[in-house]
């Protein structure tokens, strides 16, 4: 059954806080405790496993805190006559109470929770079923909540009664993984962020939320450990290589791709039809599996580039199947068949990725082959199942689902370019997971911001997604309400409304909400931002007398704070233009200082994937580059004009470029406001790229004269120093572009470049870029300012 059958008598999810009713008589149910005392004992099998002992310990610890007394843990051979029992794990006593039960034949992680007479039985699949049963019972029946690694709700109920229970549940998603710093030490996490104690805590927390996937390496063995995936991905010979060229290529070049008539391994793959190579792959895979007894899958998957083999045999299969996935699946099927006699329960995972995304016409993956698809190019403004923006991925998923016995989904639930700004994908999380299950998803890996401690409601997201993976049919709105009420107390209604405001804003915009977004300018309007700010003010006021809750609410406001800092000037202009309120900080410099302190206070970690917030960050730190900067003087061309008839673009008006060594902000007394943007002549990136001019009141069809104030450091007077331009993003065309000779701008004095009069619009922007030159000719170019003068 998909739905976990929970007895509704106790009203389990009423705001997440309603506890079982204490009564003198439990009717047909059980009275586990009365007045803080209990006759119950926790019973283990004679030969209890480590996991069963852990399950009994977790039950003892948490029930003890609930009822106020500690229940003894004893072996089933030592149970006193007549004592009521909570039976944890499968032994002779469980067999007697539930005749005919064969745990070894249960699907993975199946749980059984059953009241039998005065006894309660908590058993399941041998690996971790008893543990999952205990956690499910504690959470759904007793009311325990594990919000984070360290923050837990334990109800106090000295009179504890439970209703009759008869639950048998198998999670439809067999392999469940969620990457957030609270839960996972996945391979991309910066391990300097966490201590050994924290790593252990995240493993225990993962187990309590019934996660088990390959990303949860810190789940201790006594908690069932993770479902090990041997090799991760790209294992041909890139990551955890199975057949590394350094070992094999010299003697067996024919095992590697034939490309343009030559056997090669650089940016290439394997020759998938070579029989000797297949035999060696089977031997190596078997060797790896023997060394990893906890594994459930092994990755035999292409490298992270193209270069598939063009030999006659490989090409013939691919041409017949209409896709390079043909030779790949034919190969992986052979490996899966080769290891099956020794490893009948192991599945071989491979990728449907890049050039192998299209399913083959005729070949079908074997029963022990898993095909993994990734949603990295999708839009999370819309669901994967119905959104018009996600047609291609949907075709891939459903195409493979029709021919493959299992698929595995690598889904993306964060914004890797900026963990610290809002990313409103709450409305697609549950529908997407249900969509995966309807398409044979054996496993789901939800990759969140594994390195951040202050992202937008990351604790809610981790908890919510984990619960949806355990039970995809759970009511996501009830889960959100439960977490918010339990974790934020009286602030919850305002924070829930905030989530809805952000969701409405992104859906209304229709933006292609990728998992790589620089800022919120494309979807978060001033009016929505004002509403969000008011809601946080109300939330803060609701918990002002509770320091713990107040600190939690203040931390969750940080993404909105960052939006105000990043877009301060443009939002201020919009408020002035439209007459709307401006609820941003009155003193942006003070707000920026407070934000820095909060990042330090919370040990923020990464602000984007693989990028830690530096301990000594300053004003030039990328996420702060849109803060207010000093105004420049009024240029001669604009003196006497009203503020609405000319626009000055300074450092805060350029989109941040996070790739290193593209530019830096420097002090320069010759610049109009004392600051300049220096770009080395080692690249041609538009590292000086303004925000859309609509932010500055430029209306469609208006005419403006555009000026750049620039210079360069050079030892020659010949050639080109840099390029200046204007681009219309709506029409995807260049409005103007001009190469600037070195001789025109060489030296320490800034030169004014008139780019002419042009018809501009809301989606046009100006840009400047260096050109690549030898450092002994042109070292760097500098942009002081760009200003625009309205032309009648």
Image: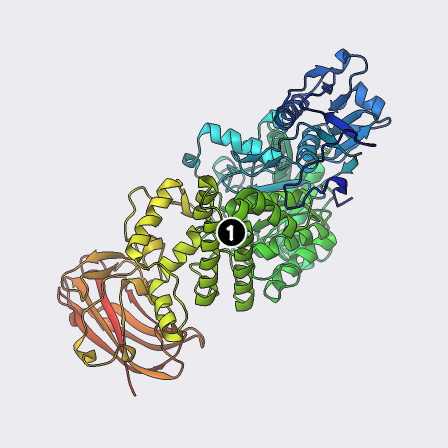
The 10 Å Cα crowd at callout 1, few under 14, some 14 to 19, many 20 or more, is many
Task: Identify the residue at image location x=28%, y=52%.
Answer: 619
Q: Extreme bottom residue here?
A: 792
Is residue 316 visible from the viewing direction of this image? no
Q: What residue is pinned by disc 1?
A: 414
Relative to residue 389, is residue 260 depicted above or below? above
Q: In this view, does 651 lie to the left or right of 214?
A: left
Disc 1 on helix, strand or loop?
A: loop
Residue 326 location in percent, x, y?
66, 53
Task: Identify the residue at image location x=75%, y=36%.
Answer: 107
**Quarter where residue 18 is shown:** top right
Task: Pick the residue in front: 11 or 595.
Answer: 11
Task: Pick the residue in front: 597 or 279.
Answer: 597
Task: Pick the residue in front: 255 or 609.
Answer: 609
**Quarter where residue 775 is shown:** bottom left
Q: In this view, does 80 lie to the left or right of 67?
A: right
**Quarter where residue 116 is shown:** top right
């Amino acid at each position: 059954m998909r739905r976990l059958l929970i007895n509704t008598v106790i009203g389990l999810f009423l705001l997440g806080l309603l506890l079982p009713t204490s009564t003198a008589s439990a009717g047909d149910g059980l009275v586990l405790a009365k007045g803080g005392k209990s006759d119950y004992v926790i019973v283990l099998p004679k030969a209890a496993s480590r996991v069963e002992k852990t399950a009994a310990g977790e039950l003892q610890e948490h029930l003890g805190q609930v009822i106020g007394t500690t229940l003894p843990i004893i072996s089933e051979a030592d149970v006193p006559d007549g004592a009521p029992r909570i039976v944890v794990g499968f032994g002779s006593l469980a067999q007697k109470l539930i005749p005919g039960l064969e745990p070894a034949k249960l699907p993975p992680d199946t749980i059984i929770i059953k009241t039998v007479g005065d006894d309660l039985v908590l058993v399941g699949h041998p690996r971790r079923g008893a543990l999952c049963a205990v956690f499910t019972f504690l959470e759904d029946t007793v009311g325990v909540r594990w919000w984070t690694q360290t923050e837990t709700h334990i109800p106090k109920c000295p009179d504890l009664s439970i209703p009759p229970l008869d639950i048998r549940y198998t999670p439809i998603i067999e392999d469940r993984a969620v990457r957030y710093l609270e839960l996972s030490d996945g391979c991309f996490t910066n391990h300097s962020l966490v201590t050994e104690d924290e790593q252990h805590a995240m493993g225990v927390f993962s187990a309590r939320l019934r996660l088990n996937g390959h990303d949860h390496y810190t789940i201790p063995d006594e908690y069932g450990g993770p479902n090990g995936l041997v090799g991760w991905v790209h294992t041909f010979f890139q990551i955890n290589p199975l057949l590394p060229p350094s070992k094999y290529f010299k003697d067996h070049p024919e095992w590697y791709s034939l490309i343009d008539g030559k056997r090669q391994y650089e940016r290439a793959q394997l020759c998938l039809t070579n029989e000797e190579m297949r035999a060696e792959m089977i031997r190596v895979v078997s060797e790896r599996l023997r060394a990893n007894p906890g594994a459930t899958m092994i990755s035999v998957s292409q490298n992270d580039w193209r270069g598939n083999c063009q030999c006659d045999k490989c090409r013939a299969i691919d041409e017949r199947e209409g896709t390079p996935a043909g030779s790949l699946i034919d190969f992986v099927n052979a490996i899966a068949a080769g290891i099956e006699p020794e490893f009948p329960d192991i599945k071989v995972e491979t990728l449907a990725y890049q050039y192998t995304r299209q399913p083959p016409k005729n070949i079908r993956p074997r029963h022990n082959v898993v095909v993994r698809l990734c949603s990295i190019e999708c839009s999370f403004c819309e669901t994967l199942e119905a959104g018009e923006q996600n047609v291609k991925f949907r075709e891939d998923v459903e195409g493979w689902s029709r021919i493959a016995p299992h698929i595995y989904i690598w889904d993306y639930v964060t914004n890797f370019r900026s963990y610290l700004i809002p990313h409103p994908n709450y409305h697609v999380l549950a529908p997407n997971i249900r969509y995966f299950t309807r398409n044979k998803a054996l496993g789901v890996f939800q990759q969140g911001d594994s390195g951040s401690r202050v992202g937008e409601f990351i604790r809610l997201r981790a908890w919510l997604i984990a619960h949806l993976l355990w039970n995809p049919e759970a009511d996501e709105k009830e889960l959100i309400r439960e977490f918010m009420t339990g974790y934020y107390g009286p602030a919850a209604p305002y924070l829930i409304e905030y989530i809805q405001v952000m969701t409405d804003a992104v859906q209304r915009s229709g933006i292609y909400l990728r998992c790589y977004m620089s800022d919120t300018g494309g979807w978060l309007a001033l009016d929505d931002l004002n509403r969000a700010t008011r809601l946080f003010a109300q939330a803060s006021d609701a918990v002002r007398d509770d320091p713990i809750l107040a600190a939690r609410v203040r931390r969750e406001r940080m993404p909105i704070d960052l939006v105000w800092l990043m877009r301060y000037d443009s939002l201020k202009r919009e408020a002035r233009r439209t007459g709307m309120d401006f609820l941003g900080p009155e003193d942006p410099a003070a707000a920026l200082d407070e934000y820095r302190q909060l990042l330090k206070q919370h040990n923020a970690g990464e602000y984007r994937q693989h990028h830690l917030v530096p301990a000594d960050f300053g004003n030039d730190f990328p996420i702060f580059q849109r803060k207010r900067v000093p105004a420049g003087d009024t240029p001669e061309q604009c003196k006497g004009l009203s503020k609405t008839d000319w626009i000055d673009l300074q450092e805060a008006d350029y989109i941040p470029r996070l790739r290193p060594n593209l530019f830096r902000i420097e002090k320069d007394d010759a610049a109009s406001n004392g600051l300049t943007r220096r770009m080395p002549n080692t690249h041609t990136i538009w590292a000086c790229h303004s925000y859309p001019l609509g932010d500055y009141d430029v209306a469609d069809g208006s005419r403006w004269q555009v000026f750049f104030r620039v210079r360069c450091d050079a030892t020659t007077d010949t050639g080109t120093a840099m390029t200046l331009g204007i681009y219309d993003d709506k029409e995807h065309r260049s409005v103007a572009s001009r190469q600037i000779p070195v001789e025109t701008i060489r030296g320490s004095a800034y030169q004014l470049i008139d780019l002419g009069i042009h018809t501009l619009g809301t989606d046009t922007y100006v840009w400047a870029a260096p050109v690549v030159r030898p450092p002994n000719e042109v070292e760097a170019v500098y942009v002081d300012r760009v200003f625009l003068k309205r032309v009648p």
